[in-house]
Image: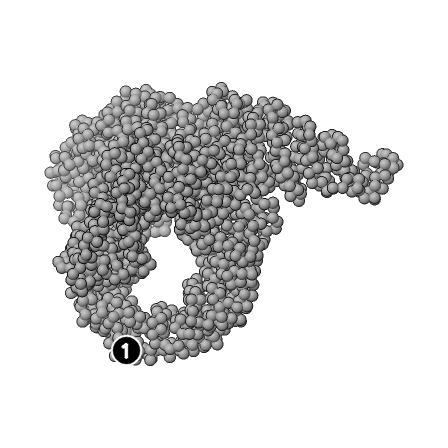
Amino acid sequence: MLSPEKRKNPSDVEDEENEPEMERENPETSGQNVPKAGVKKRKRDLAWSFMEGLAGPEPFEALKSFIAAAEAFKSREHGAVDIVKDFFQNGGTGREFLPLLDMPKWKTNEVALVFNSLEILFQRMASDLTEYRDLGANVASSILKSNMDTIYRTMLPSSSATQIKSALRLLTTMVTLGHLTARAVITRVDFAHENLVEASQRKSLHDLPDVRSTFVMFITSFLLEEDSMLLRTISENPAILWPVFFHLRTDTIGVVQLFLEALRDKVVMNPMLSKTLKFHIFKSSNLVQLMRLFHWIGPQKPKRFGKEDTAEEPPLDEALEEDKVTIAELLQSLLLSLTTSHKFGIAFPDYSLGVDSNTKNNLILEMLQNLFNFWGGTSPRIVEIQSQLVVKTIEKCPDLLDCYFRSLAPEIDMIRMSVPWLKLCCIIKEIIETQKLTMVFNPKEKHTVAQQMLRAATLVGPLSLPRNFFTKGLLMDHSGIRLNVGEILQVIFAKVNEFQNILMKHPKANMYSETEKKDIFSAFKKKISWQVPQASKLIVICREMPTFKKQVWYGKCWLVLLDLLVNYAKFGWIPEEEQINFPATEMVAAVMECDNDFSIKEDLLQNLKLAIFTLISSLSHLPKMSEDQQTCLVSQLSSCLKKNIRPELRLCVGSLLLKLANQPELPHLHLSSAELNIWTSSLERHPEATEFFAEVFSSFLTSSESYNEEYESIFGALKTVIQEQPCSQLVLAAWKCINQIDGDQEPIACYISAVMCDLVPCQKGDLKAFANVLLKAAPKSLSSRPALDSFLKSWTKKKRPADISTMGLDRTSVILYNCCFPNELDWTTLKAEWESEIAAKRNRLDIVEVTFYQCVTCLSLSAARKSDQLNLLSLLRILVDGEVDGSGYPLHVKLLEDSRTLEWFDLMNTRDSYIVEFNSLVQDSLKLVQDHRLDQLYQRKLNDSIASVIQGEGSLEEIDEDKLLLSLSELKINEIEPQIQSLVNRLTSTADDVCLRYLNVFLQLAGRLRLEGVMQRISWSVFSQALQLFVSFDATPILKKGIYDVVSVCPEFLDAIDDFTAVLNACLKSKWDYTSFGLLLVTSSSQLCTVFGQWCLGHKKRLKDINWRLQIIPAYLANAAADDKVLDMIHRYMSPVLKQLLVNRSDFLKVCDEIPKLTEFLSVLIPKRWTVEDCHELATQLLSCTKKGFSCSQFVEAGRHGTHYDLHAKLCLHSTVRQFKSENPEPSEVEQLTQEFDWLSKQTQADLPTLAKSIVEDAVWSKFLKYTLRIGLRALTISESPLPPLALRLMTNVWHLLLAGQGEEVATASQKVHEMVISHSEFMTVIMDERETYTEQKKAVLQLLTVLIRVNPKICQGSQIPLLLSSYHATRSTSDQLILGLLRTYEKNGVVLSPFKPYLWGPAAAAHYSIQRGVATRIAKLPEAAEVLSLLNSKKLLHTAYNFPIELRLNGMEITRESEDYDPRFTLLSLVHILSSQYEVQCGRFSQSGAISLLFATLSSPCSDMRSLGWLGLSRLHDQFQSATAWPERCLWIHLINCVRYGAADYFRERFNGARQLPPKLPNIIALFLAKAAAIIRDPSHPMYRAVNNFLLVKSAMDVTQVPEFFVMLHNTELPEQRAIQRSFLFNLLRDGIKSRQDYLVCARRRVFRILLSLQPSNLLTDKSEKRLILEIVQSSLQNSIIAYDLIQHRGLIMWLDSLLLTDTVADEPALMVSVVATMWDTLYSHMQKKRTSKQKDDREAMTKLEEEVAMMEAEDEGESKRISTSGKPTDGNKTQPARANSRKPIWDQLPMQHHVIPPWIMCELMQLLVSLWHLIYKAEPNFDTFNKYARVLCAVASHIHESRKLIHAAQDKDMKSVRFVTPPGMLTVKLMRQLVEVSSRFVSKLPDLKDHLAVVESSKTQSSVDPIELTRNWERRHSYMRELMNHEEPNSSTRYNVHNLLSLAECGI
C-alpha cells in the first residue's frame, strides 16, 4: 500500500500551500465562506493525517483522534468530518488496524482503542456504507482467525468493564456485517471460554450499559440475523444461550425487552425455521429461566455462574411495578406465540386429546407446570397475565387439559377461603369455558362410542379433578367456597349441553348415526355423573341454605345451587323417589323470603325465582304436597305475575301452573297452555285480580271433582270426537269464587270478562255454541255487563262487532276481532299496526301463542271472504315468520300440529289463491322445523290428496317433479304402490302427460325406497304393469327416469327376459337418448346382450348415421355373447361418415356434446376394423387443415393403430401448440397429449432418428417450445392450476422421444431449450422453492433438465453447480434425488466438482455462492468443516441412521421411495470428505452431531461401495480423534472404533478361513446397536449411558455374531425402572434391526426367538408395552419371506399367535395383532407372486440351509458344536427334512411354477387364526384402519384358499398318486358374515347392497358355482347404480369391495 505522501496529487499539494495565504488575506471570513472544494480538502487532510498517524510512532493517539472525529460526525456536530467514509475513499480497508493487535507488548486499554475503531468501521459498513461490506468481512475473518486470543485476553476478569465491552461490541458489529460473517463469528468464538463466561455475568448497577448487557446484545445480534444456520448452531451449543437465560431475571428492562422481542419476532415467528430447531432453542431448561421472568426483580448483581439466583422476591416496589407488568406482557406474547401456533410455535395438533394421559406437547406441559402456584402472586395484573397464558395455551392444545388438571389436583383439593384458591377456581373455569368441543370429532378417524365419550369427558374436565372435590366444596360452611365450586360445576354442565348441541347439529358429527349419537351422549352423561355429587347431597345443601342468610354471597350461591339442580333434573340424575319427596315448598318459601332482603338486587331476585320454578317444572314427578302447601305455592306463583317481571319468569310460572293442573292425580281438568296464558296475561291489565286468581286456581286444584259434573252439564255437549275441549273447569271456579266475594266485584268482573272474551276466538270448535253457553251459564254479575253481553251476542247472532273498548283486551285481540266481521277495513294501516304490536310482544311467547290461535280461528271464520282471508293469512305469516333461528320455531310447530292446518293443506289445489299461499306457508314451516314425524304426517296427507284426485274424475294439476319428489320423500312402499297402480289404470284408458309425470315421480320414489332395504322393494306385479305401459307408449321419455331408477336398484327384475326384451326394443326404436338404460340392460344380462345384437342386425337403417345407440356398442362387444357381425355392419356403414367427421373439429365437438361416449366407440371400432391406410389418410387430412385446429380425441386412436408415427407426432405437436396458445387450456387434453408422447417414445419399431428430425424441423417447433415453457414455468401451486407440471411433463416426454432418435439437430435444440429454461424469469422461484410450494413443478423441471443433459451432455457447465446445490436439501425426496442424479451426471460428463468441496446445500449454498437469477455472482472462500456440520440436523441424522435404507447403492441413479431423512449417498460423502486430514474437525461437535451413528449404520449395507465409504470414514475419524489430544472424551470414541474394527476382523477371519473380505459387512442388528451406542455415549445423562458404556469398556473386540448384551438387558436385576428402560432398548433394537437372513442367524446365536416367543405370554413380563414390543419384533421379522417361512414351519408361529388371543395384551389391542397377521400375509403373498412370475428362484434349498444354520448356531451357543457333523447337518434325526422321509410329495409342491400356491396347511391355520381374531375385534369396537386392514387380509386369504382349491383339485384329477389335501369347508360362517356387515356399516355408506348380499348368503342352501370375482363384480355394479341414484360418493370403496368379496366367497363355501 502506498504511503499517504505518495498518494497525494501535485495539484492537491499546491492547493494546500495556497490555502493558508487565503486565510490570512481574509481572516474574518476564513471560518465562514470557505469554498466547498476547500472543505473537501480539509476532510481529506483529516483522513490522511489519521492514516499517517496510524503508520507513525504514536498510532494509538491517532486512533483516539479517529474515534473522536467519528463520534463528532455521529452526533451531527457543526463542521464534523465523515472520517470513516474518507478513510475508505482514500484506499483504507481496515487491515491497517490489525498490526496493532500483533504488537509484542500491548496494553489492554490500547487494544480496546483498536477494537473501538474497528467497531466504528463495521457499524458504518453495516448501515450506510454497505459498498465496503466485503472489506469488513475480510477484516473480520482475519481477526477471527488470528486475533481471538487477543479478544479473550481483553475479557480477562482483571480487565476494566470498558475494555471488555469494547471486545463484545466488536464481535457484535462483526455479526451485523452479514450472515456469512455471523457464521464465522459463531464458529470461531468459544462460548465456553472462561473469560467469556465470566463476562456474561459481570454486572454493574451504575455503569450502564454494563458488561452483561453488552454480552446479551452480542448474543441477540445472532438472532436478529434470522439465519437458519446460525440458529441451528445456537440450538446445538448450549453455552451460547444459557448464560443469557440464566440471569435474565436480574437484567435491566431494556435488555430483557430487546432479547424477548428478538426471540419472538426473529425466531418464533420466522416461517423459515423448522419446528425441531425451535424445540432445541426453547428446550426445557431455557423455558424454566423464561418462566422466572414473571418474577423479574430488576438490576441485581447475580451470584457466580452455575448457582441459580434463588433469592426471595423483594418487597413490592411501586416504581418497578409498571416495568414488571411490561415484561410480563412481553413474555406472555412470546410464550403465546410458542404455545398457541401450530405453524410457528412448538405446539402440535394432537387429536388424541390426551385421553391416555400422553401428549405430543410435553414441553409445553412442563412449561405450564413450572408456573406452579402463580395464582398466589402479589401483583393482580401479573397473575392475570399468567392466567391468560395458561388458558389460551390449553385452548390451542386441549390435549394438555387432563395432565395439567391432574397436576393441579393437590392444590385445588386443599379447599380454603383464600384469594389464591378462589383465583385458581376462576382459572379452572376459564380453561373449561374456552375448550372447543368440536375438537372431539377427529375428521381423520371415526372413533367408537366409548372412545368418543371419553374424549368429550376429558375436554369437559371433571375426570381430571379430584373425585370428591365438588362434594367437599359444596359441603363447606362458607358461601364463597360453595359459590366457586358450584360455578365450576355450572361451566361443566354448560359444556355438557354444548356437546349435546354439537353432537346433534354440527356437521362434524354427521359421521355418526342418530342411534350412535344417542349412545355417545348417554355414555358421556353417565361418565360425568360419576364425577359430580349425588343429587341427594345437593338437596341437603339447599335445605341448609337459609342458615347462611347473612353471608355475602348468599343470593349468588342460592342461584348456582338451583341452576345445578335444574341440570340434574334435565339429565335425569334425580331419582324418582327424591323427586316425590323434594322439598319444593320449603325452597320456594326460602327464595320468596329474599324479597325482604334489600341487599339482594332485583335482577338476582328474579333469577332466583326463575331458577326455583324452572327446577320444579323440570322434575318428571311433582313433589308430594298437602292442600295447604299447594295453595301456598299457587299464591307465591301468582304473586309473581302481578309484578313487571321478565318474560322468561312469566313463562316459567305459567308452565309450573300448567304442570300443577295436569297432575295424574287430577284427571279431566282439560287446562291447555293457551287458556292458562289467557288467564295469566290478563293479570297484567288487571293486577288487582291477582289474589282472586290465586284463590280460583287453588280451588280449581283442590275441588276438581266437584267441578267435573257441573262442567259436563254445561260444556259436555260442545265436545266432539275431533275437537278438543272448549275450555277447562277454571272458568267454573272463577264463576263460583266471584259469587263469594263480598266487597267490590268490579275489578274482578272486568278481569273475568276479559278472559272470557279472549277464550272465545281461541276455540277450534263451534264458536256460536260456545258463546251461547257462556252467555247462559255465566253468573248474573258477569252476563249483565253490557260490554260482555254484546261481545258474546256478536258471535251468536252474527251482527256487527260490539264495542269492546272497555273490555281491557289486548290490542292484537281487538285487531283480530274487527277482522272477523264483514266490514270495510284499511288493511295497509292494519298490517302496519299489527307488525308494530307483534314486534313489541315478540319476546312474550304466552301472548303470542294466544294471538296465534285467535288468528287461525279468524282464518276459519273468513272462508267465504277470500280477499279478507288472504289478508288474514298475511297477518299469520307476519306472526310466525318473525321467529328467530335457534328458538326451535314453536309457532311453526303449533301451526303444523293444529288439526285445522292439516285439514286445509292441499298441494293438489292450485286454483284457489288462498290455498296456494297457505300451502306455501306450511311448506316453509316444514323446512324450518325439520321434524320427521310432521313430515310424514303431511306427506301422507299429500298422498291422500293425490289418490283422491287420481281415483276421481278430475284432472291432475301440472307439477314440479323435483318439488313433488321432495314432498313425498317420507312415504313407504305400501303407500306408493296403490298410487302407481291407480295411475297405470288411469293411463291405460287415457293418455295424459301430466299423469305420466306423476307416475314417473312415484317410480323414482320406489327406486329410492329400495335403498332402505329389500322390504321397501316395489312388487314385480305392480312394476311390470308400469313396464308394459312404458312399452305401449313407445318408451316415452317422461317415464325414463322412473323406470331406470327402479331397474338399476332391482336387477333381480331382469330375470323377466320377455318383458325387458320388449323394453329394450322399445328403447332402441325411440328417437330419445336411452344410452344409460341400454347400457344397464346390456351389461346386466347376457340374454339381453344377445337381443341387442339381433336388433342391430335387423335394423341396419338405424345405424347408418351417428346416434346414441353407438354408445352401447363397446359394452356389447365386451360381452362374451357379442356377435362380430354387428361391428362389421357398423364399420361398413359408419366408417365413411366417421372419417368425414374426424376431419372437422367443430362438427366433431358438437357431436361429442350430443354423444359423450363417442370416443369410447371409436376406441373399439378403429383398432378392430380400420386399416393402416385408413389411419394414415386421416392423419394426412388433419395435417392439411391445421389452421382449423383439431382435438386430441380426433386422431389418438388412429395414431396408435397406424404406423405413421411421424404424422402422429406432428399432430400431437400441433394440438399442443393450439392448446397452450388458447387462453384456457384443457388439463385433460394436455394429459392425453403427454401420454401420447410417452407412448411414441416407447415405439421401438419406429424410425426414431427420422421421427426426431421431423419434430425438430416442424414449423411449429419453436412455438411449441415457447408456449410449453411459458405455461410450465409459471410459479403456480397445484391448487391454483394443474397445468405447469403437466406442461413440463409433456415437454419431458417429447425429449425422451427425441433422445431415442437424437442427432445434431436434436442436440442443438436441447441447448436452446436448456438456455430458455435456465433464463426464465420464474425459474429461480420454482427451482429454489424453499417453502415447498411448487413441489410437483420443481420435480418436473428437474426431470426435464435430466433428459436434456442425456440428449446433449455438452450442456453440463460448472457454473450451474452452485444453483443445483442451492436447490438441494440432501433428503430422499424425489426432487433431491433428481438433483443428486444431475450432479453425478455433470461429474460423468467432465465437470469437476472438487472445487466445490466440502459441499454446502440449501439456503447456505445460496448465500455462500450469492445465487442471483441462477448464476453464482461470486464464490467466497471454501467452506469449513464446521459449516457443513452446522447444516446437519442431529435428530434427522440419527433418524436416518436408525432407519438406514440398506437397499440404496452408493452409485445408484434410480429414484427410490421418498423420505424426509437424509440421503446417505450424498451425506456420507460429505462427512467422509470433511474428516480428511486437510480439514480441522471439532471432534466434540462432530460427535454431538450424530454423524458417527450414520457411519456405523452404513456398515450393514449390502452395497460394498457404501460399506467401503463407511469404513473409510471411521478410519479418518479415528485419525482425527488421535490428533485431538486436548479433547478428554477421545479415548472412549477411539476404543469404540477399535472394538468394531477388531470384532469385524476376528469374525471374518473365522468365517473365511483367514481370507480377508473387504469391506466387511456387519449384520443390521450390530450396525444399529453401534449407531445407537454412538448416540448414547455422547450424552452422559442418557438413561442407557451406564449400561452401554460398561459394555463397551470391557470389550477389546466386539462379538458381531450375537445380539449385544441380550441376556444382561433381558434379565437385568436392577431397579424396575432401569430394567424397563434396558428391555425397551433391547426390544427396539431387535424390532428395528432384523432385516435379513444374517440378522436372523445373529438372533439364533442366543436363541432369541425361542426365548421371546415363550416370554411374551408368560407373567414374567408385567409391562404390556414390552409384550407389544415382542409382537412388533415378530412383525418386523415377518417382512422377510425366508424368515417368515422358518418361523411358521419350525417355530409354530401361527399357532403361537392363536394362543395369544387369550392374553390381555391382544385382547386390549387387537389392532396390533391385525397388523402382525397383515404383515405375514403380505410377505407370503408377495413371495408367491415373485415365484409365479419367475422373479424368485425356488428357495426350498435356502430354507433348508437356513434351518441347518439356525440349528448349528443354537448348538454352538450351548457348547454342543461337537454334535454337529462336518457337513453341517444336525445328527439328531428330528432335524432332517420331513420331505425326504416321505417319497411322496404334496401335490401343491408339484404344481407348475405359474400356478404356485402357498401351502394349504399354512392357509388353513392362518384362516383359523383370522376367524378367532375376529371375536376379539368385534368386542373391541375397531376403528376404521383396523377393520379395513382385517377385511383386506381375510378377503385375500379366503380368495387364495378358493384359488388353491381349484388348482389342487384340477391337479389331483391328473395325478392320483400325490398326497391329497382337503380344505375344511365353511370357515366363513353366516354369523361371521353377519357381524362383518354390522361393523362395516359404521365405515361405509348406508346403502343396502351389503345387507342384501348377506340375505342371499343366509338364504342359500347350496354352494354357488359362480366365480366369486364375478359375483362381487355384480354386487359392485349394483352398488354403483345405488350410489348414482343417491348422488352420493362412497368414502371407503375398498372396504365395501372386500366385504362383498367375503360374502361371495361365503356363497362359494369357503
Image height check: is 1011 above or below 1601? Answer: below
Instruction: Give neighbour class at mark 1: few <14, some 14-19, many 20+ (Cα, 10 Å).
Output: few
Taking the image as drawn, is residue 1657 in sight? yes
Q: Where residue 671 appears, x then y in whole percent?
A: 19, 39
- Residue 941 horizontal/vertical position (percent): 21, 55
Which residue is drawn at the image coordinates 69% and 40% (left, top)? Answer: 93
Quarter location, residue 1862 = bottom left
Residue at 15% of width from left, 43% of height from top?
A: 715
The residue that disc 1 covers is 1125
Q: Position of residue 582 (x, y in %)?
A: 20, 29
* Residue at the (41%, 47%) spot, across then down: 1555
464, 673: nearer the viewer: 464
Position of residue 562 measured from the top left corner of the image (x, y, whole percent): 28, 30
Left or right of 1631 in this view: 968: left
Q: Is residue 40 above or below residue 313?
A: below
Is residue 862 among the parts visible in the rendering?
A: no
Q: Amino acid at mark 1?
A: Lys
Would residue 1530 be found to the left or right of residue 1706 on screen? right
